[in-house]
Structures are given as structure tokens and as C-alpha cells.
Image (cartoon, rainbow, N blue to C red):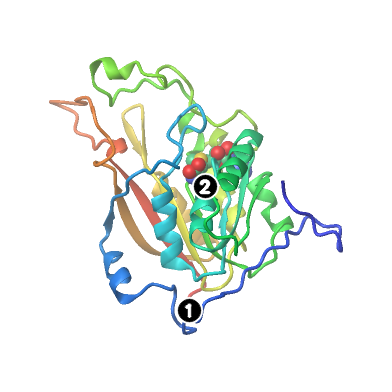
């Protein structure tokens, strides 16, 4: 449950956002050169750990804690403020807590916010930082946070309305096709405010509106997204997002491939011998932007 600032009677959250480390001003993170060098590789792999949510009934689309942790370590210092506008099961908040970063996450779905709070309560290695999960539309973030406080916005957003159909599991092999997800719609909700119900163009526009002014100058933004296939056409969601964020002052900086080949298995043959496509389940994009870095 979010804390209310009782003095002003507003929804503004009371949460620290200043560095607590001793790093020199021009450093973008607290990493040592040895740790930094590992992140220069443009293809990343992650493993899930026990605390990760892998049960699709709890949440259908989580990223690994290790992914959020790597991005938070790269683009923030200890004590700084991380924001996840579409926090889902709360993975970003768990990673922030591990790393002693303050963090706020938003989600439309009350059940997911309850799951975030459960995960945060279970796990308390450090207690020097604060993590808050807010059950609200990401469009209202500005009512909760002051401008120029967020150092990193990281998320895996909903995928326009491309998940709003019954899942056929065509990428899966033989009997694995009819798993728990088969013939189910994996959309988070049919709530009109859910970005996963919008057409791609409208979706990109809404993403831009939400992101505008969220981040302080020279702040970083990381978006984990995959492209999708629809009626045998590739839908380049990552390009729609890059174009949308550039319109509102974000500078596109890096694109990293999240190589998922170590965590997917039992892929069925698809398209052979006449229709070549790359399997979306084997990789995703991690897109990195900087705000007003001139
Ligand atoms: C891909 S999931 C995020 C998963 C998260 N990274 C995790 O590891 O659990 C996207 C989330 O966006 C939420 N969502 C969709 N539209 C929203 C909106 N307008 N405001 C806030 N949350 C929204 C959905 O409920 C869903 O949980």
C-alpha cells in the first residue's frame, strides 16, 4: 500500500532518491573496472533463481531478477531512485532491494501488487532502502513522484494488443504444445487502461506520454521487449518504442540482445522448408536510452 504524504494531503510518495555512496560525481555507477568489463558484451544471458516467479498463473510474463539487477547496477548508484511503470510481480523492486536502491513500481492489477508486497516482505537482506508498489495506472505516476528524482526507469512493458488472442504455442514441439498456456489468452486484463489492449500506434503514443518527464536529466531508461509475429508478419515493437521515446527527448543509446537459448527448450520446427523466421522465444531486446544527455 502506498504511503501518503500527510502534510500536503497529496499522493506524493516520501522516498529517498539521493546517492548514498562515495563515488566520484562523473561515475554512472558504483561498478569496479572488473565488473564493468563484463557488461561491455552486447549479448546477455541470465539464469532464473528460486525467488523468481515462473508460475504463469501467478504472472504470465516476468523477467529474471538477474536482468533487473544487472541494469540497476549499470545505471544507478546506491541510494538512487529506480522506477518501474509496469512492475507486474515486482521483480524490479526485489532487485532494487538486493542492491540497496530505492524503487517504486506501478501496476493496474491489484493481484500483482499483492504479489510484489509478498515478495518484498519475504526478502530483506538490506533494510537501508525503500521499495513501494502502487496499484495505479502508469499514466498517473506524476501524481506520486516529483520531477527530477528518478535515475533509472526500467520495465518490460505490455505488448500492445498482440497478446490479446488465444495462444497456440506454435513454437513448441509435439506434445509440449498443449501445455497450461494452450488456447488461453495471456493478456494481463481487459481493462481499457491496460496498454496491452491498444493497437500498436496508439500504444506507442501512450508509452511516449507516460515516459515524458518521468526521468531526470542524464537519467537512464531501459526497456526489455520482444518483437512479435502476427499473421506471418513481424511486428517490430522495439522500433515503435524507440521512435516513441525519441519524440519525447530520450536519446537511443544501446541495444542489447537477451539471449534466452540457455533457458528455452523443446522448440518445435517452424516454417521449414519455405518460411524462415527467427523464434521470438530465443531472444529479446534490452533497449537503453539516456534523457537529455547533451
Ligand atoms: C510484462 S508485465 C511486467 C512484468 C514484470 N517485469 C515482472 O517481472 O513481473 C507488464 C505489466 O504491465 C501492467 N500494465 C498494463 N497496463 C498498465 C498501465 N496502464 N498502468 C500500469 N500497469 C499496467 C500489466 O498488469 C502487467 O503486469
- Secondary structure beneath disc 1? loop
Query: What residue appears at the point 66 percent right and 49 percent down from the top-left corner?
Result: 139
**Can residue 93 be seen?**
yes
Give the x, y percent position of residue 202. Answer: 56, 42
Q: In this view, does 234 lie to the left or right of 291?
A: left
Q: In this view, does 53 lie above or below 246?
A: above
Residue sitting at 56 percent across and 75 percent down? 20
Question: Dot 2, how many residues are within 10 Å of its Cα: few (below 14), some (14-19), or many (20+)?
Answer: many
Q: In which quarter of the image is residue 40?
A: bottom left
Against 231, residue 135 (above or below) is below
* Rendering coords of residue 96 (x, y %): 52, 57
> Hey, which residue is sitting farthest left in the picture?
273
For ligand 1, the image quadrant comes to top right
| Residue 201 visible in this rendered orientation of the protein | no
Q: What element carries label 2?
A: helix
Other-residue count near label 1 (Cα within 10 Å), few / some / many at <14 / 14–19 / ≥20: few
Could you tell me residue 98's position as x and y percent? 49, 57
Number of marks present in the image shown:
2
Snapshot quadrant of residue 253? bottom left
Q: Which of 15 and 237 is in front in this view?
A: 15
Contact between marks 2 and 1 (CB within 8 A): the answer is no
- Answer with left or right where residue 149 lies relative to residue 153: right
Residue 179 at x, y = what percent?
A: 36, 18
Q: Is the CB–ligand 1 distance for label 1 below 8 Å? A: no
Using residue 192 as the reference point, say whether residue 267 is left or right of it: left
Instruction: Choose top left, top right, bottom left or bottom right for residue 287.
Output: bottom left
Labelled disc at residue 294: 1
Per the image, the residue denoted by label 2 is 204
Q: Residue at x 46, y 19 (%)?
A: 184
Residue 125's place in the image compared with 135, above or below, is below
Label disc, if present, on residue 41 of the rendered structure: none
Counting residues from the start of the chain, the first of labels 2 and 1 encountered is: 2
Amino acid at each position: 500500500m502506498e504511503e501518503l504524504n500527510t502534510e500536503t494531503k497529496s499522493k506524493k510518495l516520501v522516498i529517498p532518491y539521493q546517492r548514498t555512496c562515495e563515488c566520484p560525481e562523473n561515475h554512472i555507477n558504483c561498478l569496479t573496472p572488473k565488473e564493468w568489463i563484463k557488461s561491455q558484451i552486447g549479448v546477455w544471458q541470465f539464469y532464473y533463481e528460486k525467488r523468481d516467479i515462473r508460475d504463469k498463473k501467478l504472472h504470465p510474463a516476468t523477467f529474471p531478477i538477474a536482468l533487473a539487477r544487472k541494469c540497476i547496477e549499470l545505471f544507478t548508484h546506491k541510494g538512487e531512485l529506480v522506477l518501474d511503470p509496469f512492475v507486474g510481480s515486482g521483480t524490479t523492486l526485489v532487485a532494487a532491494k538486493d542492491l540497496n536502491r530505492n524503487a517504486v513500481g506501478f501496476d493496474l492489477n491489484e493481484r500483482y501488487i499483492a504479489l510484489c508486497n509478498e515478495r518484498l516482505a519475504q526478502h530483506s537482506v538490506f533494510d537501508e532502502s525503500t521499495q513501494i508498489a502502487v496499484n495505479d495506472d502508469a499514466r498517473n505516476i506524476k501524481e506520486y513522484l516529483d520531477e527530477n528524482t528518478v535515475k533509472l526507469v526500467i520495465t518490460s512493458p505490455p505488448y500492445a494488443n498482440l497478446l490479446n488472442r488465444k495462444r497456440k504455442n506454435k513454437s513448441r514441439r509435439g506434445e509440449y504444445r498443449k501445455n497450461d498456456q494452450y488456447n488461453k489468452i495471456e493478456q494481463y486484463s481487459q481493462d481499457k487502461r491496460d496498454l496491452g489492449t491498444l493497437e500498436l500506434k496508439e500504444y506507442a503514443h501512450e508509452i511516449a506520454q507516460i515516459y515524458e518527464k518521468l526521468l531526470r536529466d542524464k537519467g537512464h531508461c531501459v526497456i526489455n521487449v520482444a518483437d512479435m509475429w502476427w499473421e506471418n508478419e513481424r511486428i517490430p515493437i522495439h522500433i515503435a518504442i524507440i521512435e516513441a521515446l525519441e519524440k519525447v527527448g530520450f536519446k537511443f543509446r544501446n541495444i542489447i540482445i537477451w539471449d534466452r537459448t540457455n533457458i528455452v527448450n523443446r522448440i518445435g520446427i517452424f516454417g521449414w522448408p519455405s518460411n524462415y523466421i527467427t523464434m521470438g522465444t530465443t531472444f529479446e531486446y534490452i533497449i537503453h536510452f539516456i534523457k537529455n544527455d547533451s
